[in-house]
Image (tube, rainbow, N blue to C red):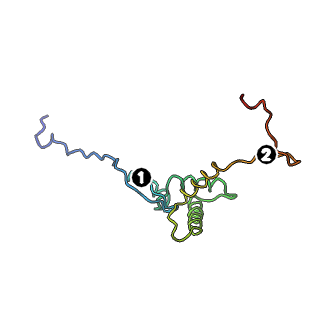
Amino acid sequence: MAISGSESQLPPLKVVVPSTEAEFVKCDSCGFTEECTPEYISRVREKYHGLWICGLCVEAVKDEVMRSERVITTEEALNRHISFCKDFRSLSPPNATEHPISAIGRLFRRSLDSPRSLPSTPSGEVDVPPESCFIE
């Protein structure tokens, strides 16, 4: 069986290569900006009803679902979290440019810098560990 020249040529093969170029995208919840690939951005938007949610807010939404006293949907947890972020931003002065994530980081660093009080006994005396705990 002979194959003519026109039959032996296959149509050109189309290869789709995922884009590895990252782009910046702003979280629709907290306003934090991340650098992600377009494919990842699309997957997150599909899961969260067209909204871009940063990784920290995704974790907060998951936590909201887990700690709720009743069963709630991801969409309801997302709405609660977005409301929380909106309320948090409204507490800041109108000209504040600090993101909620930055503010939490600042509070965390401040708590690490503050001296810790020593535990006290019921009589009010400071409970100092025995000297054997200290290396001489």
**Numbered badge on residue 35:** 1
Please name the residue shown 71% across and 29% down the image.
Answer: 135
Tag 2: amino acid: Pro
Instruction: Work out how far the residue at label 2 is from the one at label 1, CA to CA, in angstroms.
Output: 45 Å
**Numbered badge on residue 43:** none
Q: Is residue 54 above or below residue 17?
A: below
Q: Residue furthest top?
A: 136
Q: Residue furthest right?
A: 123
Tag 1: amino acid: Glu
Q: Residue furthest bottom?
A: 94
Q: Which residue is mark 2?
A: 119
Provide residue 30's location: percent of width, then percent of height.
52, 61
Please name the residue shown 70% across and 58% down the image.
Answer: 69
- Screen quadrant of the C terminus: top right
Local SS, label 1 = strand
Occupied quadrant, residue 83: bottom right
